[in-house]
Image: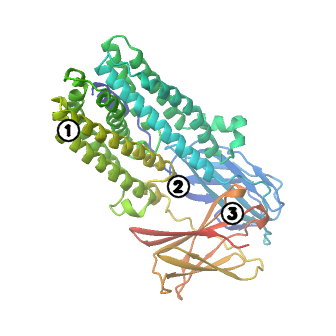
Amino acid sequence: MKALLALAACLLMWSQAAWGHAALISTDPAPGAVLEQAPGVAVLVFNEPVSVTALRLVGPRGTARDVAPMDVGGHRIRVRLPGDAVRGAYLLSWRVVSADGHPVGGTLDYAVGLSAGPARAADAYATPGGRQAAIWLGRWLGYACLFACLGAAVFRARNPSDRQAWAWPLVWIGLGLLPVNLGLQGLDLLDLPAPALSDGSAWAAALGSRYAWTLGLSALALLVSAGALRAREAGMARGCAGGALALAGAALAASGHAGTAPPQWLSRPLVALHVATAAAWLGAFVPLIRLTGAGRDGTAGWAPLAWFSRWIIPVVAVLLASGAGLAMSQLNRPADLWRTPYGIVLSAKLALVCGLLVIAAFNRWQSTGSALAGDAPSRWRLRRGILLETAVAVVLLGVVSLWRFTPPPRSLDAAAVDIHDDAHVRPHGHASASFTLSGDRARATVTRSGETWSVLLTDRAGKPFTAQGLTLALSNPQAGIEPLRREARRLDDGRWHAETGPLPSPGIGHWRMGLEILVDDFDQVTLEGPLPP
């Protein structure tokens, strides 16, 4: 515990002004603007400092080129635009990484001249589904190896005669996963396919992100836990075990949603304490399984179980208290637990933790005492209980790894800042077309006339669906075009109306439409589907 307190004191001084996922709050030119002359510079202003990972300009001549920012870091990103711009429509697709280490993307559209022909992009990017699955799996396995090695180090520190040799393969697997996760982070930051790992840009982007600190500190935690396994003296083993727990806590506090929640003087120590205590608890399951399955007679060989039974109660108390503090910093209201993706993951985690506590309480109060007294049936019952705890813990780590893809509600609120449309983009003579997007609660009939969009919202029974706001999001993942968003306004007849600039031709891949329907302050419905050509 002294190591954890020292770590918390250090992290109190490690604070930066960050709010999690970055949100675009203004642009110049304005979204959808029609300009007489081509701008020399585009400006993107965010609600927090960001680092640019990708900027891609799609023009009307069928060309798509990467452009570079004029500024590095900060809230305001200036982009120098090519001087050979011709009349037509342009899309500036941007992708940035915020303080929590997660990429955020969007698209700014504008046109030069009074007649804006459609832009056409040439290159196609790989869809991100497989990449996201690999990121999730890599993190899940990485957490499992790290926690198991930490638990082995703690038990070795308590019982130097048990060398915990089973943990050595996990040390090497955990270290081997670190460069894999680093490469996946680089691909995600730049939105690149797997073959791009042969290029140094993905690795450079990953090394420049905060997640590189997480992986570096995780490597140190694994190496220090290995030191505890190799230590010949009890004092050295205890020091290494405490240091490994502290390093693991610092690793996960260095990046991620929770570590960047304001105020960081509180959130970072809470993350560090939460991770260290979770590792001490969950990592102990494998050593306990080995202990209960060793077939020891008498009570002397069961001394580590007695020690763990006494020691784990305050550890779990700190775990629960720190977790409650982190949840309060990420959620705006109780309804976020079931109405946001982040809250759903958190709810699943809480359910699994409650299950662990119930199993642990049964083991502690119904089996441990009699097992320590030498009762053979109680020992086997305890072993089955710990095996069940281990299975739940493995699932729990998999659920926690999903947070990589779910922004917390506090960031979703920041991203809801209106970007007012100051210019009118004209339709270009396209025939009207209608299509329907359906969900469990709502149905949207979308009518497109040129670049004018009309949306009628109904429920599943065909009755009007009341909403406070509606946002259109048009994206083309295959062409590397991030979501282009427009706030819609409701007309007197109940329909929602929005206008966009011309979209690239359908030959570059499939466009997708998302409708983000704000029902009230506590509820949002999202409909998504392919956009008909």
- Tag 2: residue type? Ala
> Which image quadrant for residue 147?
top left
**From the viewer's perspective, is the residue at label 1 or at label 2 nearer?**
1
| Element carrying mark 3 | strand
Which quadrant of the rendered structure holds the C terminus?
A: bottom right
**Disc 3 designates what residue?**
109
The residue positioned 68% from the left and 50% from the top of the image is: 55
Query: Please, what is the three-letter code of the amino acid marked with disc 1?
Result: Ser
Quadrant including the N terminus: top left
Query: In the shown orientation, is residue 109 left or right of residue 4?
Result: right
Q: Residue at x 61, y 48 (%)?
A: 131
Query: Of circles 3 and 1, which is in front?
Result: 1
- The residue tagged 2 is 23
Bin the neighbour count of mark 3 within 10 Å (Cα to Cα): few under 14, some 14-19, many 20 and up: many
Crowding near pointer 1: few (<14 within 10 Å), some, many (20+)? many
Q: Nearer the viewer, residue 382 or 390?
A: 382
Q: Nearer the viewer, residue 309 or 133?
A: 309
Residue 491: image x %, image y %? 54, 84
Identify which residue, 362 or 199, lies in the foreground: 362
Most extreme residue toward the top, as rendered?
232
- The spot of residue 120 in percent (x, y) is 79, 62
Instruction: Find the distance from the CA under tag 1 to the CA under tag 2.
Output: 52 Å
Assign a secondary structure to mark 1: helix
Horizontal relation, residue 519 to residue 112: left or right:
left
Mark-to-mark CA distance, 3 and 1: 65 Å
**Measuring 57% from the left and 67% from the top, which residue is drawn there?**
420
Q: How dense is the environment of label 2, judged by Cα within 10 Å: few (below 14), some, or many (20 and up)?
A: many
Query: Mark 1 = which residue?
Result: 367
Q: Amino acid at mark 3?
A: Asp
